[in-house]
Image (spheres, grey):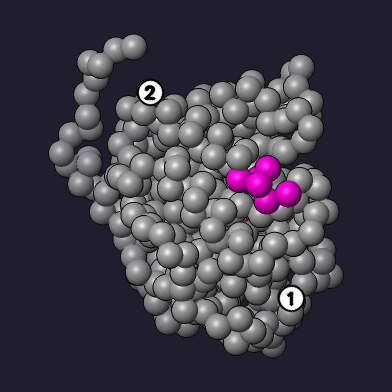
Amino acid sequence: MTTYFNYPSKELQEELKSIAQKIVAPGKGILAADESVSTMGKRLSDIGVENTEEHRRAYRQLLFTADDKLAENISGVILFDETVYQKADDGTSFIQLLRKKGIIPGIKVDTGVVPLMGSEDESTTQGLDDLAKRCAKYKKEGCDFAKWRCVLKIGKNTPSYQSILENANVLARYASICQSERIVPIVEPEVLPDGEHDLVRAQKVTETVLAAVYKALSDHHVFLEGTLLKPNMVTAGQSAKKNTPEEIALATVTALRRTVPSAVPGVTFLSGGQSEEEATVNLSAINSVPLTRPWALTFSYGRALQASVLRAWGGKKENIAAGQGELLKRARANGLASFGCYEAGSVKGAAGDTGLHVADHKY
Ligand code: 13P
């Protein structure tokens, strides 16, 4: 094992560190609005709206033209490639709109999951080949961070060594390419909540996966201060008995403390099919665990920030303000949760406490 390698230049370290720290500034988190065309189609069909480019643009415009107060709790938005080049009705590009609000645009750069041959239905994530070129292009367009999602499944024999090792390595390679192009990588090894496993099993799998990810990041000389982690919360499987927020919080923080170096500035959880309310209550409990937490612990929610927005909007012009109101409310609730200060049940959304789980979820 070689010990001869180079740290990034001082300038690059400073740039990456400062972007990462802004994203996890106190009370702030990320809106994940990077649904692919087909995933967005499913969200739109749920509310009876056809999946056209114009409808996807109109919906993202609703999100990005919400009141400037949004920036009090949303520091970054993850975009999908199509959205990077779209504009609001008045011709302002979405990226400019976000930047004017003080929100940092980010970009999903993986191109999706593919099967691992010989495995029990496990996967890796692709998109490395032209990644440096794409990162350089997105940086020019105004994106300062990126996301790459890997998926791990809990089963009788999974996750396998093959999938743990492969996904850790591909995340590390992605992270190092992003940093070389001055983009902060969000490293997302999602352990899916599908299954009947209990909380302890979920904790052990999450610990094993995260330990492998940080070993790979070290092997690839990734500059940890300029990265963020986007993990699952540790929860029992969807088909198992639910634990209390306090049990989930303790298992989650314990797993992170055992595996995530304190050089990492922040952890931005995915919501993973939890209802809006559950995702907020659990984040608040996580920030109330009586253990030292050396990183910011906040949100990077897709479904749990958008379910009520979609429901309230329903594809109708006259409901745009109502949809934006839902977004502001949920962002504020999660902002409070990032301080451990959200009172359960205090923010009611149009989607109520509807579960948002999708089996074998694709993004
Ligand atoms: P959910 O919050 O809907 O799980 O999605 C977050 C995300 O970005 C997954 O990659």
In the rendered image, is residue 22 in sight?
Answer: yes
Q: How many marks?
A: 2
Q: Is residue 107 above or below residue 224?
A: below
Callout 1: CB less than 8 Å from ligand 1: no
- Along the line of sight, which residue is nearer the eye, 273 or 96? 273
Tell me the amino acid under the disc marked 1.
Asp
- For marks 1 and 2, give the CA distance: 42 Å
Where the N terminus falls, by quadrant? Answer: top left
Q: Where does label 1 land, which residue?
A: 353
**Magenta part, dominant SS:** helix
Q: Residue 176 carries which label?
A: none
Looking at marks 1 and 2 on the same chain, the residue that comes earlier in the sequence is marked by 2
- Residue 314, given in percent of the width and then of the height, sits at 76, 77
Where is residue 169? Give x, y as percent. Answer: 50, 25
Residue drawn at 71 percent across, 38 percent down = 153
Residue drawn at (39%, 77%) of the image: 72
Q: Which of 123 and 343 is in front in this view?
A: 343
90 is higher (above) or lower (below) than 56: below
Which stretch is magenta?
A: 198-203
Rendered image: mark on residue 219: 2
Residue at position x 26%, y 54% in the image = 18
- Residue 49 point in image, percent of width and height: 80, 68
Q: Which amino acid type is shown beneath numbered disc 2?
A: Asp
Secondary element at tag 1: loop
Bin the neighbour count of mark 2 within 10 Å (Cα to Cα): few under 14, some 14-19, many 20 and up.
some
Q: Is mark 2 on a helix, strand or loop?
A: helix
Q: Give me the residue at 22% from left, 40% from top.
A: 12
- x then y, percent, for residue 237: 75, 51
The part of the image, by quadrant, that contains residue 250 is bottom right
Mark 2: C-beta under 8 Å from nearest atom of ligand 1:
no
Residue 137 in view of the camera: no
